[in-house]
Image (tube, coloured by chain):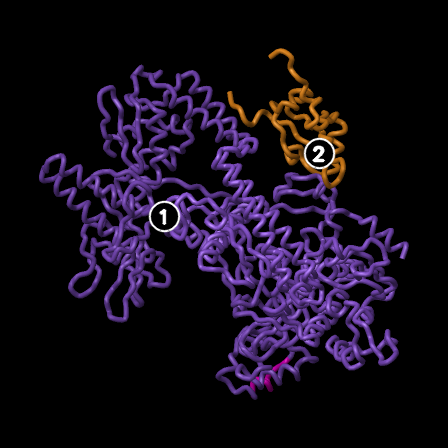
Chain colours: A orange, B purple
């Protein structure tokens, strides 16, 4: 489609970024978990596609929170869960 | 007791194959006769003795056990013709649609088929069950959407299912019924691999097993017969149903053997199908339910398992307990809020196990001597060897003598014991709290009315449950975590949920209002109910007599370093609002250094569910224990004040003066005239419609606006001027004890326009609501406008209108409770395993993270201020004071 909009610039889309592997290892160590224990995000999620995340990556989401002002969440990118073949 | 060390690693469900059914069967059921002439079960009948021993003294001919240890054995019925299992029609349809009519293979090309099989194996290995499920769905969709078989090229015809169990095949010309035999043949043709592709398991659930050729007959223990006092046997529903099945089955077989016409065979076959279907599930839609001769609906197998009372939710997951009591509750304000009054009769039945030690041996001997009949007594003694001695039938003197350290005495419930108290529905953690026992006469459980809000209890016949923890750990846990005072603050938002209501609030107002001055006598009376031991303070008025104010009495109980400042409930009315400390209406509470300087106490400061109230700050600053004692002592004083004052209300307090009444009547007349004009305008078609509304809707809106909002406000203004704060009804409404200003207008002013779903009342007769009006009358009176207030009385028509509108509210509550109850059940089911870990993360049982920090800010709402971790205003206020 022509004139595509960049969803990352939409005000309702919080900031997403891929966590570099070194940081990711540290994060997982801090939480004492395996990557799959993080909440999942599908690799074909529009935002995941837009920032170029591949399955196995960890995404950091920085968003506004009504209770904490700003909150950092993490997502583990997995192969598309919704579509098949 | 031995500890079970093996764990169940997995459970697999499957379908019984005909072979399996025959193999586990001990007998074939062939006859409809159940008992012979001697009343003994007939061999080959549905109650064949081989299917397990159930009578006392009977030995099972199969396993040789008696009733207690015979597990029961299955029998079977050989069906003359196969029938469809109703619970599996969905899957049968899927298999028929996805496979070829001619060769029985899945309608997917061979190369893709192999690829899918490999993919499925991979998914299985990786343990991705969800993906596997989705993949099966995809395969099914692909196979059903193809009509030409890629293997044999046969053009499959459409299959149609007519619920509950009739299948049709559609050719170009006709719709032909498929018999269960034909269906079974087709299912048999499906290769094992294709079953796997479609999500089945050929080892434990071959598709053709969904069409029954052999019916298992459950053991006799599953369907016991009951012998009534009259000696007549009454059989279980399943037994009745099985007899029906055998009867029809035999008839069908005879017809087939004698070569009866096809139509007759088909009719019997259909009947057999019906009986087998209702035997399995008697609530299938589309067929009539099977009934007893008496008309009672029979219970199928599915009905035994399904729903709230079913085997799963009702029996397996249902819990029942010992050491519990239940009766009607009644109020007793003289109890502490963490106490519960237990009738002596109950205290003699509920027991607490107490271990004998050198320190309590004399005390326990006395209890043992008293025995089970006399209250502080005991019911059982457990000796160290585990022998339990009932004190009912033995020489209690001897038992008391033999008592030694190490024995356990199950003694009666005594004052000071800890028990759990509960009222259903238990939606909250505060629906179950620990209370301290107080054994009292009479027959009801008693609780302080202040703890009604957490239980949502009232005393119109409510019953509550009581449980006695039996172990030391349980009692310690109850005392530390569950005691009432630990729950004064709700975990919902951190405000107090326990607090004054009704008379407590009226009393608090009466006590602290400026006009109340107390003689020494009265002040002493009030303080005595609190158990106050100190002296009276300096009287506020010395001459002509010594008088004390209520505020002085309240101040006695406030901590000396406590400061507080807040508006009152009465100050929420504009006429009585104050902004600064110079307040003529006394509507601003100021506490400085533990002295209540100014302001009346009302709902905002001492009421329940009032965050940031006086009570809230007291509990936050001085602890729950202080909060409890404050409530126990000071709140009692409030109620006593009500009694001293003689607080009451009557008809006279609601009657308006003649002038006020006539001015209200004028207002009504004005407004009615306006409505008439509107109707006139509408009739002439001159009314301007509101945006997005039709002419009729606009008229209705205008009328409702005029008659309810505008009119009620204007009437309320007149009434407020008339009613002053010395009127008990007004005191209750303004302090928040009971009722609100709208109720006041409705009582002494007018009820106004009655509505159902926000519309004027319309339904009833054709063109009118009641036969008292002309058809087509859309005037105010004809559509539910009530001129009178409760004080004036309603005429019959008005009374009817009011009842019609009042019913809406009742229906709303009924619908809301059932819906929210179901939602609660589903939410709790989904969330019950979430837990906050020590690192602040919220995780599921297997360690998957739900939230990195609880609530994203890690704040415990119970210890927060309205969800915020700190209340800066309060800190500043405290520092300034």
Q: Would residue B13 appear left or right of B552 to someone viewing this image?
A: left
Whole-percent x, y for residue B572 in the image: 73, 54
Position of B456 with respect to B293 (left or right) is right
Q: Is residue B746 left or right of residue B84?
A: right
Q: Quadrant of residue B151?
A: top left
In the displayed structure, B94 sits above or below B20; it is above
* Residue B402 is inside the magenta segment: yes
Rendered position, B807 above or below B267: below
**Magenta residues, as a range?**
B398-404
Q: Position of residue B27 (x, y in %)?
A: 24, 51
Tell me if residue B855 comes above or below residue B612 in the rendering.
above
B453 relative position to B807: left or right: right
- Per the image, the residue denoted by label 1 is B302
Disc number placed over residue B379 in the picture, else none: none
- What residue is drawn where x is 67% and y is 63%? B730
> Residue B550's image quarter?
bottom right
- Specify the farthest residue to the right: B880
Give the SS element for disc 2.
strand
Horizontal and vertical percent position of residue B738: 63, 62
Return the residue nearer the eye: B776 or B184: B776
Residue A85: x, y in percent? 51, 20
- In this orientation, does residue B763 appear? yes
Q: Residues within 10 Å of mark 1 (few under 14, many from 20)?
A: some
Q: Give the quadrant of residue B565.
A: bottom right
Overall secondary structure of the magenta section: helix
Where does label 2 land, which residue?
A73
Mark yes or no: residue B477 visible.
no
Q: Residues within 10 Å of mark 2 (few under 14, many from 20)?
A: some
């Amino acid at each position: 489609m022509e004139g595509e909009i960049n969803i990352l610039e939409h005000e309702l889309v919080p900031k997403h970024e891929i966590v570099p592997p070194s940081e990711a290892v540290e994060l997982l160590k801090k939480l004492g978990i395996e990557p799959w224990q993080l909440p999942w995000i599908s690799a074909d999620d529009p935002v995941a596609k837009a920032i170029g995340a591949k399955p196995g990556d960890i995404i950091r989401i920085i968003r506004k929170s009504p209770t904490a002002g700003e909150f950092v969440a993490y997502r583990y990118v997995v192969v598309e869960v919704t579509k098949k073949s | 007791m031995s500890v079970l060390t093996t764990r169940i690693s997995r459970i697999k469900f499957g379908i019984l194959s005909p072979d399996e059914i025959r193999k586990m069967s001990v007998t074939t059921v062939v006859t409809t006769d159940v008992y012979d002439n001697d009343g003994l079960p007939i061999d080959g009948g549905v109650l064949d003795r081989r299917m397990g021993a159930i009578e006392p003294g009977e030995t099972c001919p199969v396993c040789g056990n008696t009733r207690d240890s015979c597990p029961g054995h299955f029998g079977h019925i050989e069906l003359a013709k196969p029938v469809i299992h109703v619970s599996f029609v969905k899957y049968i349809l899927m298999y028929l649609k996805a496979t070829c009519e001619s060769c029985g293979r899945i309608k997917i090309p061979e190369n893709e088929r192999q690829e899918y099989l490999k993919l499925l194996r991979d998914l299985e290995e990786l343990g991705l069950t969800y993906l596997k499920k989705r993949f099966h769905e995809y395969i099914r969709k692909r196979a059903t959407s193809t009509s030409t078989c890629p293997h044999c090229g046969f053009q499959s015809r459409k299959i149609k299912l007519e619920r509950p169990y009739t299948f049709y095949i559609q050719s170009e010309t006709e719709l032909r019924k498929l018999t269960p035999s034909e269906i079974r043949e087709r299912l048999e043709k499906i290769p094992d691999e294709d079953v796997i592709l479609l999500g089945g398991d050929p080892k434990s659930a071959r598709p053709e097993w969904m069409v029954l050729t052999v019916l298992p007959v459950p053991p006799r223990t599953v369907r016991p017969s009951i012998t009534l006092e009259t000696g007549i046997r009454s059989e279980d529903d399943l037994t009745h149903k099985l007899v029906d099945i055998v009867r029809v089955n035999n008839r069908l077989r005879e017809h087939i053997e004698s070569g009866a016409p096809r139509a007759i065979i088909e009719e019997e076959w259909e009947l057999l199908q019906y009986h087998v279907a209702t035997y399995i599930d008697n609530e299938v839609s589309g067929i009539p339910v099977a009934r007893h001769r008496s008309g009672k609906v029979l219970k199928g197998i599915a009905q035994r398992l399904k729903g709230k009372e079913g085997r799963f939710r009702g029996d397996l997951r249902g819990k029942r307990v010992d050491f519990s009591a239940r009766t009607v509750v009644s109020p007793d304000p003289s109890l502490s809020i963490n106490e519960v009054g237990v009738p002596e009769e109950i205290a003699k039945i509920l027991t607490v196990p107490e271990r004998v030690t050198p320190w309590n041996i004399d005390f326990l001997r006395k209890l043992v001597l008293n025995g089970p009949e006399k209250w502080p007594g005991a019911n059982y003694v457990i000796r160290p060897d585990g022998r339990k001695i009932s004190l009912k039938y033995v020489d209690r003197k001897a038992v008391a003598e033999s008592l030694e350290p190490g024995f356990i005495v199950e003694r009666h419930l005594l004052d000071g014991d800890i028990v759990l108290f509960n009222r259903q529905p238990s939606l909250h953690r505060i629906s179950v709290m620990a209370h301290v026992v107080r054994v009292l006469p009479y027959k009801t459980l008693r609780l302080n009315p202040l703890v009604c809000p957490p239980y949502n209890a009232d005393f119109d016949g409510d019953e509550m449950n009581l449980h006695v923890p039996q172990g030391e750990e349980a009692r310690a846990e109850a005392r530390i975590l569950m005691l009432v005072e630990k729950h004064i603050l709700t975990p919902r938002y951190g405000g107090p949920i326990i607090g004054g209501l009704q008379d407590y609030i009226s009393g608090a107002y009466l006590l602290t209002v400026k006009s109340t001055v107390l003689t020494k006598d009265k002040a002493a009376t009030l303080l005595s109910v609190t158990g106050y031991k100190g002296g009276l303070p300096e009287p506020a008025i010395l001459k002509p007599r010594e008088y004390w104010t209520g505020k002085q009495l309240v101040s006695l109980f406030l901590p000396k370093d406590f400061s507080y400042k807040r508006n009152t409930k009465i100050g929420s009315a504009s006429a009585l609002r104050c902004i600064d400390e110079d307040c003529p209406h006394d509507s601003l509470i100021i506490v400085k250094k533990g002295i209540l300087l100014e302001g009346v106490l009302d709902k905002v400061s001492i009421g329940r569910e009032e965050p940031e109230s006086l009570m809230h700050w007291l509990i936050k600053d001085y602890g729950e224990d202080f909060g409890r004692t404050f409530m126990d002592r000071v709140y009692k004083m409030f109620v006593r004040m009500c009694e001293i004052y003689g607080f009451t209300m009557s008809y006279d307090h609601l009657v308006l003066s003649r002038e006020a009444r006539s001015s209200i009547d004028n207002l009504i007349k004005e407004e009615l005239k306006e409505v008439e004009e509107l109707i006139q305008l509408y009739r002439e078609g001159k009314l301007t419609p509101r945006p997005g509304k039709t002419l009729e809707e606009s008229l209705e809106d205008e009328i409702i606006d005029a008659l309810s909002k505008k009119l009620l406000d204007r009437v309320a203004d007149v009434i407020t001027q008339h009613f002053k704060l010395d009127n008990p009804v007004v005191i209750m409404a303004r302090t928040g004890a009971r009722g609100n200003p709208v109720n006041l207008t409705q009582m002494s002013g007018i009820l106004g326009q009655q509505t159902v779903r926000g519309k004027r009342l319309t339904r009833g007769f054709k063109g009118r609501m009641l036969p008292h009006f002309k058809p087509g009358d859309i005037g105010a009176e004809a559509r539910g406008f009530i001129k009178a207030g409760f004080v004036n009385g309603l005429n019959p028509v008005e009374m009817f209108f009011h009842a019609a509108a009042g019913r809406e509210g009742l229906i709303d509550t009924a619908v809301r409770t059932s819906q929210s109850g179901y939602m609660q059940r589903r939410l709790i089911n989904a969330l019950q395993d979430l837990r906050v870990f020590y690192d602040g993360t919220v995780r599921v049982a297997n360690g998957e993270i739900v939230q990195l920090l609880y609530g994203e800010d890690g704040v415990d709402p119970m210890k927060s201020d309205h969800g915020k971790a700190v209340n800066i205003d309060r800190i500043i206020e405290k520092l300034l004071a």
